[in-house]
Image (cartoon, rainbow, N blue to C red):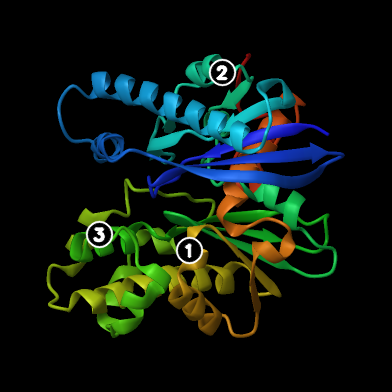
Amino acid sequence: MALYIGLMSGTSLDAIDAAVVDITDNKVSLKNATSYPIPEATKQQLLKLINGNGEDTIDLLGEVDAKMGQLFAESTLQLLTHSSLKAKDITAIGSHGQTIRHRPNQKHAFTLQIGDASRIAERTGITTVTDFRRRDIAAGGQGAPLVPAFHRSAFGSADEHRCIINIGGMANISYLPKDTQDKTSGFDTGPGNVLLDSWCLQNTGNSYDKNGDWGKSGRLNPTILKQMLSDDYFSLAAPKSTGREHFNIQWLHHQLQSHNESTENIQSCLTELTARSISDAIEEYYPETERLILCGGGCHNLFLRQRLQENLKDKTLDDSSGFGIDPDWVEAVAFSWLAHCTLNNIPANEPAVTGAHSPVVLGAIYPA
């Protein structure tokens, strides 16, 4: 048995997901998982960095990098306690880090995830692997999405074409053809929960739309939806990736400036925007898909799931729980797997997904 811990903090900024994973003989088994909240004050500092406003940005970056490293370490220690494990039981930690900027299309492309891995390794006494995305960018890729290779390992089937739909702050898809000789592919389809959550918080005070009930109570405005879907990102050819730099509350306000709609109708439009951008991408790129496997926080939005199924009527829609991994923990598990690949010198990017010129070993290692 080889135990790893995967740490994931996504664009929703609500919590750190931590998972204990057994990776033995190329098989992945989730053993335990927990969620560790990000304090509101730290979340606001992260948003300040992400939005690029305010002074003393370098000082703020250094401070929040240290804070996030401490939080990642604390989440690991909490998980060890809950799992009755000790540091010596864990081979390594795979930490995604918190993305504060993702600019893969600039002349000098870059991506930046923070959460000081030196502090994680020092505080926990466990070798830590992080900074997975930059090597792919150095190889000419987008640095995202990185999970399709893991999706192939965990959810691939020789019997049917599958598409994994991960709905976090952003949404991405991984196409897993049943013929293993065919390449795994995928890309970010656009916003997942980020606009839904931002609009909900701004107008109701709630951090998310529970079950999608508020969005379901509204009425879809086709004109607004069409305008949103006309954004250049949706017609951009893959490989492509995106983040809060593009899809954020300012983007939404710009879309709405010439419209006067009720807040719940806007939420309905945003739900359909996420569903349509995903379903349109699947129909255009992977129409032969037979089974859709849903993971990420978007699984809990029942209205969003309903709209996805309605838009993709000819395909079976499940979530990842039926395939061995709870939807809430798939990405944390993925980064434990990526750490395993790093330590074993296994390339873990998918050039067909990211656009990199070749497979490369990802990540930087911080010894215990």
Instruction: Give the CA separation, mark 1 to mark 3.
Output: 16 Å
Q: Which residue is mark 1?
A: 298
Q: Quadrant of the C terminus?
A: top right
Question: In x, y percent, where is residue 367?
Answer: 63, 14
Question: In x, y percent, where is residue 253?
Answer: 18, 61
Q: Quadrant of the N terminus?
A: top right
Tell me which amino acid carries mark 3.
Leu
Apparent side of residue 55 relative to residue 327 in the rendered image (left or right): left
Q: Which residue is mark 2?
A: 121
Asked which secondary structure carries label 2, the reply is: helix
Tell me which amino acid carries mark 1.
Gly
Instruction: Give the CA separation, mark 2 to mark 3.
Output: 35 Å
Apparent side of residue 177 relative to residue 185 in the rendered image (left or right): right
Residue 154 seen in this snapshot: yes
Q: Picture quarter containing residue 328?
A: bottom right
Query: For the residues carrying marks 1 and 2, which lies nearer the camera in this image?
Result: 2
- Circle nearer the N terminus (2, 3): 2
Q: Which residue is mark 3?
A: 201
Instruction: Give the CA separation, mark 1 to mark 2.
Output: 32 Å
Residue at 52% across, 68% down = 281
Residue at 44% across, 77% down = 303
- Circle nearer the N terminus (1, 2): 2
